[in-house]
């Protein structure tokens, strides 16, 4: 009966007596290109809950006790906050420890600094401070970029947030996603190798089972244009449907199929099966590559408020990046097309190397084993 | 739907209010011996036990016995200190069963209690329904469910649960449970009479007597019997002067009686509890010699509401509505908050602030809600009735 009474009271007297208040931490993150800076205010009471600050057990936390646990506090912070940009983790450092006072008591103030490998339009922030010891904890984020600030709240149910993509004017956003698209195709070696595999024979013609240099630049140009257009059209379609969530495919399957597409395209140069209709292959496999681009875009995050604009920007960026590659490739390949070296070393040898590289990717991606991490940036 | 309303109100208030969360300058303490924070166990050494229990639980988090003991102690600590951090810690102790579809009864009951205190009434009711479907004779679950149903204004359902307590709990517990609902549903006189008689007969614990006396005082106050209410409140306070709900209820009564001076002395040391700080600030507003305290407390409340809003809390809608109306005189914000709050909970205090906001704003929608509620429940509450009759000043 006693227990009944006790429990009864805590229900009956359901006053919103948030005397002190629920646990909050205040996280300010400012981004300037690849550089991150900021501060993180965590209540000493909460740190005591997570780490035990009160060494002498007298119910009081002194500056000496806080300082003694400085390394543990920094380690906790490092384990509970992760930033990534363009799908890659940013390196974070926590240096400096100070004290500040909020409405419910004293807080440790950590200075944070970091650097990301990319200056993507968005930053994904994963926050898991204290959720294990107090699921009602909230991380109150103030994100600052280009002089604008944005707030977000982390909770146990929403521990990952993507910020930044919808900041700045429409033109800035568009430009940021164009930039991402360009870099994605340049750094995504699988897309480049696929395109190169299809383009290598474009300056040649196959006659009587042998390669010969194309007669005119015009012929070569139109062959390239057909291939590039088909590839672009195809991957634009799938990039859009995947980014809008209309179709979704497992990324391992997509990445493996992309590697296979590179193998097949390069093999076709050594043992030609398809000679004239390579643009059809470009279209068919381009559909696959679009899903790959969508995966990269998902890592980046699309701001809900300007989805179409960002998606278009990314796509335009991919096309621009691709055109630069074509523009660099075509004149050189055309001038060398009639040489023995081009046909033997560049076409056959190069394709063989591509088959080998893409074959390794295929094994890695299909069986999820890292053989060749360095080049598999795509 | 209700939640959507609450969020809407929060959005409106956010738009209307100035963001009061200032970032102060961090500093480096000069001396290692500088005391930066006093932990709860410095105030109440018994709370150090929570720390030891938590360490022990970490070794085997799935120990149901240990976990529920810690969760219960945390819930009690939340009530005693008014500190919501303890509720989060109770939830953490229940982590292995928090999302489980069919947890053991003891965990289910504690889970419902934590959810209820976070104003997740539907979640709490779902858990209690589940629990009572398995164990129909669980007195605590019945009592908890009756309390929530009363808060939601579902008096008939509440009374059904209270009636089942007859064979499971003492006469005073059952009577108080029934009176809690029936006093709001057209039988204030009968409920009051029953309570007074049961109190005279009963030999219950201090906790139950405090609960029953507080309810008797509230009913008397609602019926306009200030003298009786004052006596019951003071009897209850003699039993437990630290009960935050009781102190807040008494402060509201005194404010209503224009006894601001008494409120100021009652709450002189209560500035840490925000619900009590609101009452203190309301009293200081009408006391010319408390001008500077009023200014300070007004700013404190602004900061605390802003802090709650930042984390997305909707637990304090009623208090914030009252703050906007009676301290800030921000009628549109108060009305939006009072309406949003009414969609979450329907205690007399919720109707009172809605009626006051309706009167101040002349909002016909709010006025209609109040009149219809009074008519359908036959609630007797002199303050609400006065609000509906008087015209806005």
Image (cartoon, coloured by chain):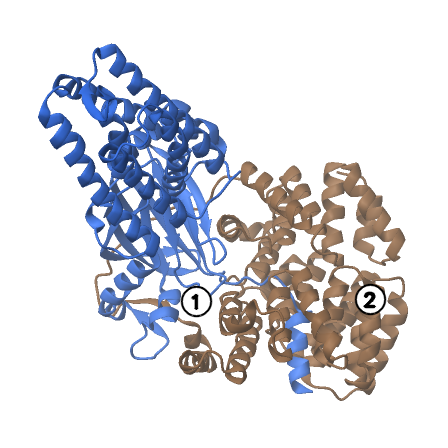
Chain colours: A blue, B brown
| Visible residue check, residue A31 | no
Query: x, y (%) of residue B132?
Result: 74, 75
| Separation of residues labelled 2 and 1 (CA atoms) | 37 Å
| Residue B381 rendering spot, x and y as whole percentages | 82, 57
Based on the displayed image, in which of its 4 quarters is residue A330 positioned?
top left
* Quarter of the figure with the N terminus of chain A: bottom right
| Circle on res. B99 | none
Give the image quarter of residue B240: bottom right
Pick the residue in front: A313 or B116: A313
Whether residue A138 is situated above or below residue A179 in the rendered picture: below
Q: Residue at x 81, y 75 (%)?
A: B162
Considering the numbered disc 2 on the image, is that residue within a helix, a strand or a loop? Answer: helix
Nearest the viewer among B137 and B349 is B137
Q: Residue at x 15, y 27 (%)?
A: A343
Instruction: Give the crowd class for mark 2: few <14, some 14-19, many >=20 residues within 10 Å.
Output: some
Res B103 visible: yes
For image coordinates 61% across by 49% down, the residue present is B323
Residue B111 placement, left or right of B342 = left
Q: How many marks?
A: 2
Can you tell which mark lies on residue B157? Answer: 2
Left or right for A42, reference A219: right
Q: Is residue A71 above or below residue B287?
A: below
Q: Secondary structure at mark 1?
A: loop
Whether residue B6 sits left or right of residue A137 in the image: it is right
């Amino acid at each position: 009966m006693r227990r009944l009474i006790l429990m009864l009271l805590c229900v009956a007297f359901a006053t919103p007596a948030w005397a002190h208040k629920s646990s909050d931490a205040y996280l300010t993150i400012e981004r300037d290109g690849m550089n991150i800076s900021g501060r993180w205010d965590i209540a000493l009471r909460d740190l005591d809950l997570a780490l035990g600050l009160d060494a002498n057990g007298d119910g009081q936390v002194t500056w000496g006790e806080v300082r003694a646990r400085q390394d543990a506090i920094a380690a906790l912070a490092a384990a509970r906050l992760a930033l990534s940009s363009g799908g890659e983790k940013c390196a974070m450092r926590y240096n400096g420890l100070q004290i500040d006072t909020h409405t419910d008591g004293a807080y440790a103030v950590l200075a944070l600094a970091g650097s990301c490998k990319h200056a993507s339009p968005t930053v994904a922030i994963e926050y898991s401070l204290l959720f294990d010891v107090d699921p009602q904890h909230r991380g109150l984020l103030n994100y600052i970029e280009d002089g604008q600030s944005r707030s977000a709240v982390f909770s146990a149910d929403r521990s990952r947030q993507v910020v930044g993509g919808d900041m700045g004017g429409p033109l800035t956003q568009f430009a940021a996603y164009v930039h991402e698209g360009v870099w994605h195709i340049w750094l995504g070696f699988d897309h480049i190798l696929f395109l190169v595999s299809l383009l290598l024979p474009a300056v040649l013609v196959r006659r009587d089972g042998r390669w010969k240099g194309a007669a005119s630049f015009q012929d070569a140009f139109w062959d390239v244009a057909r291939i590039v257009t088909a590839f672009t059209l195809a991957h634009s379609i799938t990039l859009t449907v995947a980014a809008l969530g209309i179709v979704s495919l497992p990324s391992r399957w997509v990445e493996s199929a992309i590697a296979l597409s590179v193998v097949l395209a390069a093999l076709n140069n050594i043992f030609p099966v398809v000679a004239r209709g390579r643009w059809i292959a470009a279209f068919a496999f381009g559909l696959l590559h679009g899903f790959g681009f969508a995966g990269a875009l998902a890592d980046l995050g699309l701001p809900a408020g300007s989805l179409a604009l960002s998606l278009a920007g990314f796509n335009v960026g991919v096309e621009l990046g691709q055109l630069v590659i074509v523009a660099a490739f075509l004149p050189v390949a055309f001038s060398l097309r009639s040489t023995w070296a081009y046909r033997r070393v560049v076409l056959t040898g190069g394709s063989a190397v591509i088959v080998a590289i893409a074959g390794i990717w295929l094994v890695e991606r299909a069986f999820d084993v890292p053989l060749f991490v360095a080049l598999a940036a795509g | 739907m209700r939640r959507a309303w609450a969020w809407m109100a929060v959005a409106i208030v956010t738009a209307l209010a100035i963001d009061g969360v200032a970032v102060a300058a961090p500093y480096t303490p000069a001396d290692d011996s500088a005391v930066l924070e006093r932990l709860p166990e410095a105030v109440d050494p018994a709370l150090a036990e929570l720390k030891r229990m938590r360490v022990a639980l970490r070794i085997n988090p799935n120990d149901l016995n240990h976990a529920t003991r810690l969760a219960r102690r945390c819930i009690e600590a939340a009530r005693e200190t008014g500190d919501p951090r303890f509720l989060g810690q109770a939830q953490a102790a229940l982590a292995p069963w928090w999302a489980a579809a069919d947890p053991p009864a003891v965990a289910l009951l504690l889970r419902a209690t934590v959810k209820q205190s976070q104003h997740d009434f539907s979640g709490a009711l779902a858990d209690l329904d589940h629990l009572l479907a398995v164990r129909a004779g669980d007195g605590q679950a019945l009592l908890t469910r009756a309390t929530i149903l009363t808060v939601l204004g579902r008096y008939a359902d509440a009374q059904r649960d209270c009636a089942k307590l007859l064979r499971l709990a003492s006469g005073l517990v059952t009577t108080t449970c029934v009176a809690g609902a029936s006093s709001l549903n057209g039988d204030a006189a009968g409920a009051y009479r029953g309570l007074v008689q049961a109190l005279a007969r009963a030999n219950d614990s201090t906790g139950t007597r405090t609960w029953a006396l507080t309810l008797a005082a509230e009913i008397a106050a609602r019926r306009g019997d200030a003298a009786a209410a004052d006596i019951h409140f003071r009897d209850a306070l003699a039993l437990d002067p630290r009960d935050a709900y009781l102190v807040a209820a008494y402060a509201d009564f005194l404010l209503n009686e224009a006894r601001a001076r008494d409120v100021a002395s009652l709450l002189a040391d209560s500035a840490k509890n925000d619900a009590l700080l609101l009452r203190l600030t309301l009293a200081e507003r009408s006391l010319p010699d408390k001008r500077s305290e009023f200014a300070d407390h007004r700013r404190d409340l602004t900061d605390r509401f802003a802090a709650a809003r930042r984390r997305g809390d909707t637990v304090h809608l009623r208090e914030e509505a009252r703050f906007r109306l009676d301290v800030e005189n921000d009628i549109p914000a108060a009305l939006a908050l009072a309406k949003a709050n009414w969609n979450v909970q329907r205690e007399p205090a919720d109707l009172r602030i809605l009626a006051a906001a309706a009167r101040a704003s002349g909002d016909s929608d709010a006025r209609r809600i109040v009149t219809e509620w009074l008519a359908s429940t036959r609630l007797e509450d002199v303050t609400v009735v006065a609000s509906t009759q008087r015209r806005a000043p």
